[in-house]
Image (cartoon, rainbow, N blue to C red):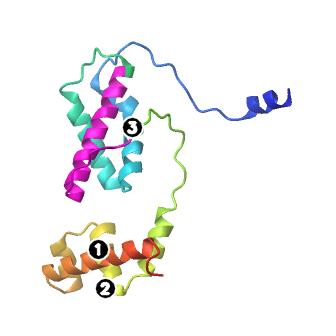
Amino acid sequence: MMMAAQDDLRPRPDLWLVSEMGYPDWASVYDDNVTWVYRMIFGRVGNQPDAEDLTSEVFLAAMRPLRLTASIAEVRAYLRATARTVLAAHWRATLGTEVTTIEDLPATVFGPAAPSTAPQRVAALLDALPDNYRRVLELRFLQGHSVRDAAAALGVSVANVKVLQHRALRLAAQINEGVIP
C-alpha cells in the first residue's frame, strides 16, 4: 500500500488526449507542434541556428502536401517523418555522405527545458585554445561575423581566417573529446 501512495505523489508529465479533429488553420498547426519539432531537431544537431533553420524547413516542406483536414495525430506523424527527411538531407549536405538510417523519432511530450551547461562548456573550451584560434571562433560563431569581416578584425587575409577557423575547430574537437588535455 505504501508504494501506491508514493506513486500518487510523483509528478506526472502533462498529457493530453489527441482528438481526431483537425487543426483549424496553419497557425494552429505551427503553434501546437513547433516546440517539440525544434527540441527534437536541436537534440540531433546540437546548435540553435541549425535547429531553427531545420525546424522552419520542416514546416515549409510539410505545408504543401499536408492537409488541414488530417487528424492531429496524422499531422504529428507527418511532421515527424518530414523532420527525419530534413535531418537526413542536412547530414548528407554537412557530412558529404549518404545517411541511410536515422533512429525513429519518438512522439515525446516535453516538459520545461532543463538549464543548459553549454555556455560554461563553450567558455572552458575557448579558454583552452590559443588566442588566435579563440578569437577567430568568437568572431565567426559567437558574434556572427562573415569570413571577410573576421579577416578585417584580425588584420589577416580571408584565406588565413579560413585556415585558422579550420584548425581551431579541429583542435577544439580534440580538446572536447579528451584527445588533448
Q: Is the stretch drawn in magenta largely helix, strand or loop?
A: helix
Q: Is residue 22 above or below residue 130?
A: above
SS label for mark 1: helix
Check disc 3 and report the residue beneath it.
Answer: 104
Between the residue at mark 3 and the residue at mark 2, the CA separation in whole angstroms equals 41 Å
Check disc 2 and report the residue beneath it.
Answer: 132
Residue at image position (29%, 21%) is 25
Residue at image position (30%, 27%) is 78
Can you tell which quarter of the image residue 176 is in?
A: bottom left
Q: Is residue 28 visible?
A: no
Q: Is residue 150 above or below residue 58?
A: below
SS label for mark 3: loop
- Image quarter hosting the N terminus: top right
Q: Is residue 25 left or right of residue 108?
A: left
Q: Amino acid at mark 2?
A: Asn
Q: Whole-percent x and y of residue 152? A: 18, 81
Q: Is residue 11 magenta?
A: no
Between the residue at mark 1 and the residue at mark 2, the CA separation in whole angstroms equals 11 Å
* Label 3 crowd bin: few (<14), some (14–19), many (20+), radius 10 Å: few
Q: Residue furthest front?
A: 100
Q: Give the residues drawn in magenta, as a range.
A: 74-103
Q: Amino acid at mark 1?
A: Leu
Q: Is residue 109 visible?
A: yes
Residue at image position (35%, 78%) is 171
Between the residue at mark 3 and the residue at mark 1, the CA separation in whole angstroms equals 37 Å
Q: Whole-percent x and y of residue 85? A: 25, 39
Mark 3 or mark 2, whichever is nearer to me:
3
